[in-house]
Image: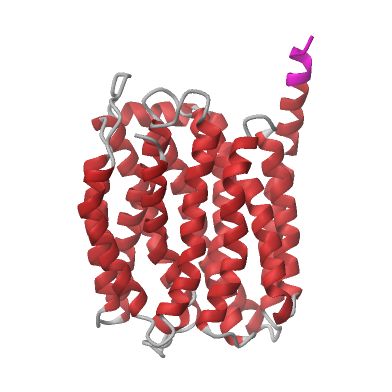
């Protein structure tokens, strides 16, 4: 089996997640008008808190068992049920509880599908394979945004409703479509896997980048989405198109960026991309409504330079029999960032607003400064590695 079926399933898995971004206002304040800024941002964070809890457990269990598929199929069932419950009636705390469960199931499925793609990579082709997996993920996100805006144009709850049935359908199809790869190394206990991961200090590099990159994504899908709806007065379908303007070039360039990372300096690509991404975030806060699509498209080009080499580096750093656990750590770091992004941005909006300021541009600048600051902090490591490489050349 090639990695193509895995990429198709990842694409479909991502549709409901981003599909809810353009209808965030309808799913929160539209159904629960008593909710405030922080409560609305919590809707986008709580599922990532679930992902933080589930991802490491799923990775450790998968590596210990030497199996991916039973856990993936079970995760699709739970994901489908939780989405259907989000579409139903209930209090806001109950909605957040199901959103938490959905995050657990979604990240379990995603982490193990990414691992399955790496398992099927041909010798020497890990860069292209993981670039393809990343492209499928981002293309699903890119497609989900306008699709969610279209489905939720009349009723926001249609997005999780149809997404739930899609996940239940995949739970039936996936065991027939995908197969595990036989483990060729000795399986370890979860405790042994944890010790091996914590001793691999270089993993901190892609994990830190994953954290801060997903923090900015959390900001974009929550605060920026609310900014487009409340300040720019854009409709849900228009918000979906603005998001797609970022995500489509990102998805199209993730595969070639992954392939190029085999030949280019991965850490250098990540640092350069992060600095340019910080510039993009500030420009986003200054752009008028008619320029947003073009600014978002430029941001998508830059984001591919960051994500693909980061994912490739993570897989390459995984020790024998630790691939699921290593990728679960990568996704956990990203999930922590995604969960903190809306909470941090929502808090900053409230702080700047209470100080009598127009809150949004200062928040854009703070988030951009975090992104650039992490990139600059990695420069000494990059310089040391570059000198070491030059020293080994004849």
The quarter of the rendered structure image containing the N terminus is top left
Which residue is painted at 68% across and 60% down in the image?
299
The quarter of the rendered structure image containing the C terminus is top right
On the image, the x and y values in percent for residue 344 come to 56, 66
Give the image quarter of residue 51: bottom left
Drawn side of residue 334 relative to residue 369, left or right: left
- Please tell me which residue lies in front, 383 or 156: 156
113 is higher (above) or lower (below) than 380: below
Residue 78 in view (yes/no): no
156 is higher (above) or lower (below) than 333: below
- Please tell me which residue lies in front, 196 or 69: 69
From this viewpoint, which residue is outermost toward the top? 394
- Please tell me which residue lies in front, 14 or 231: 14
Which residue is painted at 25% across and 67% down in the image?
165
The part of the chain drawn in magenta is 388-394
Drawn side of residue 362 relative to residue 164, left or right: right
On the image, the x and y values in percent for residue 138 come to 51, 55
Which residue is painted at 48% across and 26% down in the image?
199
On the image, the x and y values in percent for residue 145 come to 49, 69
From this viewpoint, which residue is outermost toward the bottom? 33
- How many discs appear? 0
On the image, the x and y values in percent for residue 94 come to 27, 75
Give the image quarter of residue 197: top left
Please tell me whether the stretch drawn in magenta is mainly helix, strand or loop.
Answer: helix
Query: Colour scheme in the image?
Result: secondary structure
295 is higher (above) or lower (below) than 73: below
């Amino acid at each position: 089996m090639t990695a193509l079926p895995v990429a198709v399933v990842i694409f479909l898995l991502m549709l409901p997640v981003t599909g809810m971004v353009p209808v965030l206002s309808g799913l929160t304040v539209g159904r629960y008008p008593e909710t405030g800024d922080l409560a609305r941002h919590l809707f986008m964070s709580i599922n990532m808190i679930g992902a933080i809890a589930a991802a490491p457990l799923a990775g450790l269990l998968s590596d210990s068992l030497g199996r991916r598929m039973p856990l993936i199929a079970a995760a699709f069932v739970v994901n489908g049920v939780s989405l259907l419950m989000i579409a139903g009636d209930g209090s806001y705390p109950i909605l957040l509880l199901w959103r938490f469960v959905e995050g657990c199931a979604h990240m379990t499925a995603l982490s193990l599908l990414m691992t399955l793609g790496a398992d099927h990579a041909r010798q020497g082709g890990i860069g292209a394979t993981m670039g393809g997996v990343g492209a499928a993920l981002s293309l699903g996100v890119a497609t989900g945004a306008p699709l969610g805006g279209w489905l939720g144009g009349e009723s926001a709850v249609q997005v999780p409703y149809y997404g739930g049935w899609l996940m239940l359908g995949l739970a039936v199809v996936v065991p027939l479509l995908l197969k595990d790869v036989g483990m060729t190394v000795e399986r370890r206990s979860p405790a042994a896997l944890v010790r091996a991961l914590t001793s691999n200090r270089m993993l901190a590099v892609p994990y830190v980048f994953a954290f801060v990159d997903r923090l900015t994504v959390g900001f974009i899908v929550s605060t920026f989405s609310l900014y487009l709806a409340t300040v720019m007065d854009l409709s849900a379908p228009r918000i979906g198109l603005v998001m797609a303007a970022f995500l489509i070039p990102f998805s199209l360039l993730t595969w070639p960026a992954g392939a190029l990372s085999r030949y280019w300096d991965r850490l250098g690509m990540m640092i350069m991309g992060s600095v340019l991404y910080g510039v993009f975030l500030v420009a986003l806060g200054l752009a008028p409504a008619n320029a947003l699509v073009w600014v978002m498209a430029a941001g998508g080009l830059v984001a591919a330079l960051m994500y693909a080499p980061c994912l490739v580096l993570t897989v390459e750093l995984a020790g024998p029999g630790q691939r699921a656990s290593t990728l679960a750590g990568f996704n956990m770091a990203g999930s922590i960032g995604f969960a903190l992004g809306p909470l941090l941005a929502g808090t900053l909006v409230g702080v700047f607003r209470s100080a009598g300021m127009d809150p949004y541009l200062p928040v854009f600048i703070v988030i951009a400064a975090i992104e650039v600051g992490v990139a600059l902090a990695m420069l000494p490591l990059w310089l040391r590695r570059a000198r070491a490489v030059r020293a080994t050349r004849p």
